[in-house]
Image (cartoon, coloured by chain):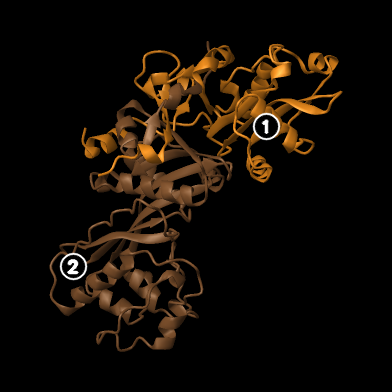
Amino acid sequence: MLAHNLVAPASSSAPPSPFAFDRRRRRQPPNHPLFPDASPSGLAGVFAASRRFKVFPLKASFWETIRSGLLKDSATQIVDPPTIPEEEEEILPQEFLLFEKTLPDGSLEQIIFSSGGDVDVYDLQALCDKVGWPRRPLSKLAAALKNSYIVATLHSVRNSPGSVLLYLQKLPTDESAQTKLIGMARATSDHAFNATIWDVLVDPSYQGQGLGKTLVENLIRTLLQRDIGNISLFADSKVVEFYRNLGFEADPEGIKGMFWYPKY
Amino acid sequence: MSLKMLLRGTTSAPLPTSLHLRTATTSRHHHPHSLSITASSASSSSSSSATFPATTLSISDAELESWGFALHRDPASLDLDRLNAVFVAVGFPRRDPGKIRVALEHTDALVWVQHRRTEKPVAFARATGDGVFNAIIWDVVVDPSFQGIGLGKAVMERLVGDLLDRGIGNIALYSEPRVLGFYRPLGFVADPDGIRGMVYSRKQKKKK
């Protein structure tokens, strides 16, 4: 998916994918014999440097991977998730690749993080079902998402076997790509001082890989970059340690979380 | 504890970072006592505001009026510099009024009391949230010169009542230790079911 967005010309009539990468944040790929059809002007439109953002460092290694993947018969290619730099100097793109791997059937699966909040409420409902949360009315779910300051998502995008090269040659779109919502976390906020994180969930079949951690870490980075000074949440006792490892402190200075419920 | 366990814990224990409190009848949680903490919002179709008892007011609107106070529920006539002064007076940091304005624009509900004669804001509380499931109350303040007569309670009861009227069942806040006793009689419980309030701190973050 990343690849086909990269080579599509700016005026492409291809339908936008649900969370299209912002092509302006791409870096010019190195000159390579396998990309003979990539015209400089086509790519320039895609790789316009008009924005002030620095390119997320992952892109370099991603391109390395793509190249070596095409040059030789690669078995499983797994790109390790990048360690998030301690100093948040680079502005976080709204959407970026966390990692990718080649599955046994030869297809490529990419895990994409996005803070753009483009979530299909039905997909979210299905994900909540998968993790065993009770149903909430769809309209309220939609309203809650809309009223959230940031909705962060993890999507899995699978390209069918053999299609990677096709994407680079700018063939259409999503017929051979499957996109799946596999994680979500959202934060409400007054847009100035405080933000509170709610509803952190990861598809059970994708758990155990550090995705929950990455999801929350990147949500935090997004909030910090928007200058929200106070990020809070309420953690079930079983996950207090999880959040502590992400930098959260329980009852700082004795400050207690309290909830209202009626006394009968 | 491995992360895998923690995340499994995330799924089996409903909504650790999103707590939805609901009354007993429709609860599916294993908790034996009547005030069960479940993963679902109270706002399922039939059970919205009917489930919550109306909050009674300790001081009526009429009484407040007779004491020379005006009640407000919007920030239109709120003097932000004077509000800032109240924040400072109770020990909050002074904040950029521009940021306060932004915060108020993105506040779900607020209640403030104005002293008519001086036109000063003397009590204030606001709530942010997602407008349907969760709300958090922030910045509950009473001007020190006007403390002790029930104005804090007055704003809190009304703010909670307004949120409940909208069907928002999960109302939370962070309380300094010395004012836990202020919130308890209003119906707030600390760490229900072991849920902990946590705040992000950059210097707290462990290095891998």
**Label annotation for residue A157:** none
Specify the quadrant that holds the N terminus of chain A: bottom left
- CA separation in Å, label 1 and label 2: 56 Å
Q: In the rendering, at what x and y percent does residue A104 appear?
A: 15, 62
Q: In the rendering, at what x and y percent does residue A222 appear?
A: 45, 51
User: Can you say whether A7 is above or below B12 in the image?
Assistant: below
- Report the residue at 62% width, 24% height from top: B160
User: Can you say whether A163 is above or below B88 in the image?
Assistant: below
Q: Please, what secondary structure does the residue beneath circle 2 have?
A: loop
Image side of residue A211 versus residue A143, left or right: left
The tint chain A carries is brown
* Residue at which label 2 appears: A106
The amino acid beneath tag 1 is Leu
The amino acid beneath tag 2 is Gly
- Report the residue at 76% width, 35% height from top: B78
- Numbered disc 1: what chain? B
* Residue at which label 1 appears: B110
Image side of residue A162 versus residue B129, left or right: left
Q: In the displayed image of the protein, which residue is found farthest to the right?
A: B117
Image side of residue B93 versus residue B146, left or right: left
**Res. B106 visible in picture:** yes
Q: How many badges with numbers are in the image?
A: 2
Q: Please, what secondary structure does the residue beneath circle 1 have?
A: strand
